[in-house]
C-alpha cells in the first residue's frame, strides 16, 4: 500500500459512508493494492481517521468479509484473504450492479461524455480490476 490514505469518504455524499468505505477497499482489493496477508487498520482507528462512528466501519468490513475478502477476528483486526473468482455469479447482485452502472452511464452522458468515451473508461476500469 502507498503512504496515502487507505480510504477517503465524502460525508455530504448521498452514498452511505459504510458503502463508500467498502467500495474504496474493494477497489484496492480487486486492483491488487491490498493483497492476501495484509492487515487493515483496526475498525476504531479507521473510524477516528474518517470521522465516523466505529459501527460504520464495522459494517463495511463485515460486508467485505461476507464477500470472502476479509477474515475478521476479534482483537486481531481484518486480514485480507486469498479470494478466487466466485464459481457462479449471484444473478440478483449482478443485475443490481448493472443497474447502478447504467445509472452512472446516464450521469456521464448528461455530463457531456460520449458513448465511446464511457465505453473506453469502463474498459480501462475493467482492465485494472483483473485478478
Image: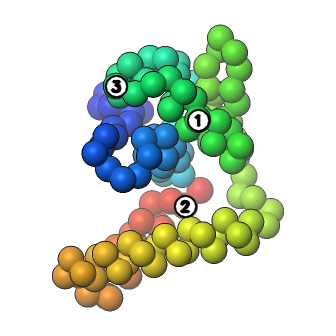
Question: Can you say whether 91 is above or below 6 in the image?
Answer: below
Nearer the observer: mark 3 or 2; the answer is: 3
Point out the residue furthest to the top here. 75
Q: SS for tag 2?
A: loop
Q: Residue 56's spot in the image, x, y percent? A: 50, 32
Depth order, front residue of 80/95: 95
At horizontal 34% and vertical 25% (from top left) the residue drawn is: 51
Which residue does the numbered mark 3 point to in the structure image? 51
Q: CA distance from mark 3 to mark 1?
A: 15 Å
At horizontal 61% and vertical 26% (from top left) the residue drawn is: 78
Which residue does the numbered mark 2 point to in the structure image? 130
Could you say which disc has been placed on residue 59 in the image? 1
Q: Residue 127's spot in the image, x, y percent? A: 47, 66
Q: Earlier in the sequence, mark 2 or mark 1?
A: 1
At horizontal 38% and vertical 19% (from top left) the residue drawn is: 48
Point out the residue furthest to the right here. 87
Amino acid at each position: 500500500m502507498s503512504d496515502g490514505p487507505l480510504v477517503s469518504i465524502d460525508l455530504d455524499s448521498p452514498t452511505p459512508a459504510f458503502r463508500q468505505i467498502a467500495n474504496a477497499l474493494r477497489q484496492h482489493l480487486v486492483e491488487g493494492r491490498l493483497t492476501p496477508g495484509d492487515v487493515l487498520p483496526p475498525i476504531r482507528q479507521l473510524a477516528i481517521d474518517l470521522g465516523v462512528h466505529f459501527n460504520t466501519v464495522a459494517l463495511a468490513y463485515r460486508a467485505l468479509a461476507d464477500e470472502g475478502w476479509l477474515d475478521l477476528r476479534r482483537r486481531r483486526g481484518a486480514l485480507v484473504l486469498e479470494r478466487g473468482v466466485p464459481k457462479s455469479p449471484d444473478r440478483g447482485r449482478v443485475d443490481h450492479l448493472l443497474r447502478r452502472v447504467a445509472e452512472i452511464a446516464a450521469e456521464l452522458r448528461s455530463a457531456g461524455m460520449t458513448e465511446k468515451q464511457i465505453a473506453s473508461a469502463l474498459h480501462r476500469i475493467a482492465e485494472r480490476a483483473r485478478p
